Amino acid sequence: MTVPPAARLALALAAGAVAVALAIALSCALGAQPISISAALARRDPDAAILLGLRLPRAVLAALVGCALAGAGTALQALLRNPLAEPFVLGVSGGAALGGSIVLVAAAGLARVAGSAGEALAAAPPVAAGAVL
Protein backbone atom coordinates (compact mmCIF):
# COMPACT_ATOMS: atom_id res chain seq x y z
CA MET A 1 0.00 0.00 0.00
CA THR A 2 1.50 3.29 -1.08
CA VAL A 3 0.85 6.57 0.63
CA PRO A 4 -0.09 9.45 -1.70
CA PRO A 5 2.52 12.21 -2.00
CA ALA A 6 0.13 14.82 -0.59
CA ALA A 7 -0.38 12.75 2.55
CA ARG A 8 3.36 12.27 2.96
CA LEU A 9 3.92 16.00 2.57
CA ALA A 10 1.22 16.78 5.15
CA LEU A 11 2.70 14.24 7.56
CA ALA A 12 6.21 15.65 7.10
CA LEU A 13 5.01 19.23 7.65
CA ALA A 14 3.06 18.23 10.75
CA ALA A 15 6.06 16.37 12.16
CA GLY A 16 8.28 19.39 11.46
CA ALA A 17 5.83 21.77 13.14
CA VAL A 18 5.66 19.52 16.21
CA ALA A 19 9.46 19.34 16.34
CA VAL A 20 9.78 23.14 16.14
CA ALA A 21 7.13 23.61 18.85
CA LEU A 22 8.91 21.13 21.13
CA ALA A 23 12.26 22.82 20.53
CA ILE A 24 10.78 26.23 21.39
CA ALA A 25 9.13 24.84 24.53
CA LEU A 26 12.34 23.13 25.63
CA SER A 27 14.37 26.26 24.92
CA CYS A 28 11.98 28.33 27.04
CA ALA A 29 11.96 25.83 29.92
CA LEU A 30 15.74 25.35 30.24
CA GLY A 31 18.32 27.96 31.05
CA ALA A 32 20.94 29.18 33.48
CA GLN A 33 18.29 30.55 35.83
CA PRO A 34 15.59 28.02 36.74
CA ILE A 35 12.07 29.40 36.38
CA SER A 36 8.56 28.21 37.09
CA ILE A 37 6.48 28.15 33.93
CA SER A 38 3.24 28.44 35.90
CA ALA A 39 4.55 31.49 37.76
CA ALA A 40 5.74 33.03 34.50
CA LEU A 41 2.37 32.52 32.83
CA ALA A 42 0.71 34.05 35.91
CA ARG A 43 2.90 37.14 35.22
CA ARG A 44 4.84 36.91 38.49
CA ASP A 45 8.29 38.49 38.38
CA PRO A 46 11.11 37.56 37.82
CA ASP A 47 9.88 34.39 36.11
CA ALA A 48 7.62 36.28 33.70
CA ALA A 49 10.39 38.72 32.78
CA ILE A 50 12.82 35.89 32.08
CA LEU A 51 10.38 33.79 30.09
CA LEU A 52 8.47 36.45 28.19
CA GLY A 53 11.24 39.03 27.90
CA LEU A 54 14.26 36.85 27.18
CA ARG A 55 13.72 33.18 26.43
CA LEU A 56 10.54 33.19 24.34
CA PRO A 57 11.60 35.97 21.93
CA ARG A 58 15.00 34.33 21.42
CA ALA A 59 13.46 30.91 20.79
CA VAL A 60 10.89 32.26 18.33
CA LEU A 61 13.54 34.31 16.51
CA ALA A 62 15.82 31.27 16.30
CA ALA A 63 12.96 29.25 14.80
CA LEU A 64 12.20 31.99 12.27
CA VAL A 65 15.86 32.31 11.26
CA GLY A 66 16.12 28.54 10.88
CA CYS A 67 13.03 28.50 8.69
CA ALA A 68 14.42 31.35 6.59
CA LEU A 69 17.74 29.55 6.12
CA ALA A 70 15.95 26.36 5.13
CA GLY A 71 13.83 28.28 2.64
CA ALA A 72 16.86 30.03 1.19
CA GLY A 73 18.68 26.73 0.77
CA THR A 74 15.68 25.13 -0.87
CA ALA A 75 15.27 28.10 -3.21
CA LEU A 76 18.96 27.95 -4.13
CA GLN A 77 18.75 24.25 -4.93
CA ALA A 78 15.53 24.70 -6.92
CA LEU A 79 16.91 27.68 -8.84
CA LEU A 80 20.04 25.80 -9.88
CA ARG A 81 18.24 22.45 -10.25
CA ASN A 82 21.02 20.85 -8.27
CA PRO A 83 20.21 19.04 -5.00
CA LEU A 84 23.86 19.33 -3.94
CA ALA A 85 24.06 23.11 -4.40
CA GLU A 86 25.20 24.96 -1.30
CA PRO A 87 26.57 28.44 -0.67
CA PHE A 88 30.10 27.21 0.02
CA VAL A 89 30.38 25.32 -3.27
CA LEU A 90 28.97 28.21 -5.31
CA GLY A 91 31.10 30.92 -3.69
CA VAL A 92 28.17 32.80 -2.19
CA SER A 93 29.59 32.49 1.33
CA GLY A 94 32.99 33.75 0.23
CA GLY A 95 31.40 36.74 -1.51
CA ALA A 96 29.36 37.58 1.57
CA ALA A 97 32.47 37.36 3.74
CA LEU A 98 34.32 39.65 1.35
CA GLY A 99 31.51 42.22 1.40
CA GLY A 100 31.35 42.23 5.19
CA SER A 101 35.12 42.48 5.43
CA ILE A 102 35.21 45.44 3.05
CA VAL A 103 32.69 47.27 5.24
CA LEU A 104 34.78 46.53 8.36
CA VAL A 105 37.97 47.79 6.69
CA ALA A 106 36.14 50.93 5.57
CA ALA A 107 34.86 51.39 9.11
CA ALA A 108 38.39 51.15 10.51
CA GLY A 109 39.62 53.77 8.04
CA LEU A 110 36.66 56.03 8.74
CA ALA A 111 37.17 55.65 12.49
CA ARG A 112 40.65 57.15 12.17
CA VAL A 113 39.28 60.15 10.29
CA ALA A 114 35.82 60.73 11.74
CA GLY A 115 35.80 58.75 15.02
CA SER A 116 32.21 57.91 15.89
CA ALA A 117 31.09 57.60 12.25
CA GLY A 118 33.50 54.70 11.83
CA GLU A 119 32.11 53.04 14.93
CA ALA A 120 28.59 53.37 13.52
CA LEU A 121 29.69 51.79 10.24
CA ALA A 122 31.23 48.86 12.12
CA ALA A 123 27.88 48.02 13.76
CA ALA A 124 26.01 44.86 12.75
CA PRO A 125 23.46 46.31 10.25
CA PRO A 126 25.99 47.96 7.91
CA VAL A 127 28.21 44.88 7.95
CA ALA A 128 25.19 42.66 7.17
CA ALA A 129 24.21 45.00 4.34
CA GLY A 130 27.74 44.76 2.95
CA ALA A 131 27.54 40.98 3.09
CA VAL A 132 24.24 40.98 1.20
CA LEU A 133 25.46 43.33 -1.51
Image (cartoon, rainbow, N blue to C red):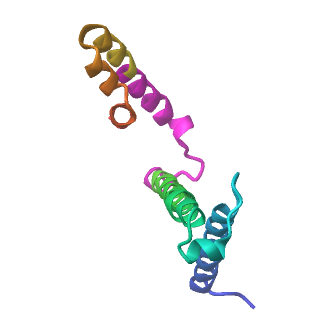
Answer whether residue 129 is visible to the viewer in this image.
yes
Where are the magenta residues, as a range?
Answer: 77-103
Number of labels in the image equals 0
Query: In the image, residue 13 lies at what x, y percent?
Result: 58, 76
In the rendered image, the quadrant that contains the C terminus is top left
Q: Can you say whether 68 is above or below 95 in the image?
A: below
Q: Nearer the viewer, residue 92 or 121?
A: 121
Principal secondary structure, stretch drawn in magenta: helix
Q: Residue at x 31, y 27 (%)?
A: 120
Q: Is residue 83 magenta?
A: yes
Residue 21 locus on image (x, y percent): 61, 72
Residue 75, x across and y down, in percent? 45, 56
Give the image quarter of residue 6: bottom right
Name, please, the residue furthest toward the right: 1
Q: Is residue 3 left or right of residue 10?
A: right
Residue 125 counted in the magenta span: no
Taking 57 as reference, is 19 above or below it? below
Q: Could you say which is closer to the camera, residue 18 or residue 58?
A: 58
35 or 71: which is nearer to us? 35
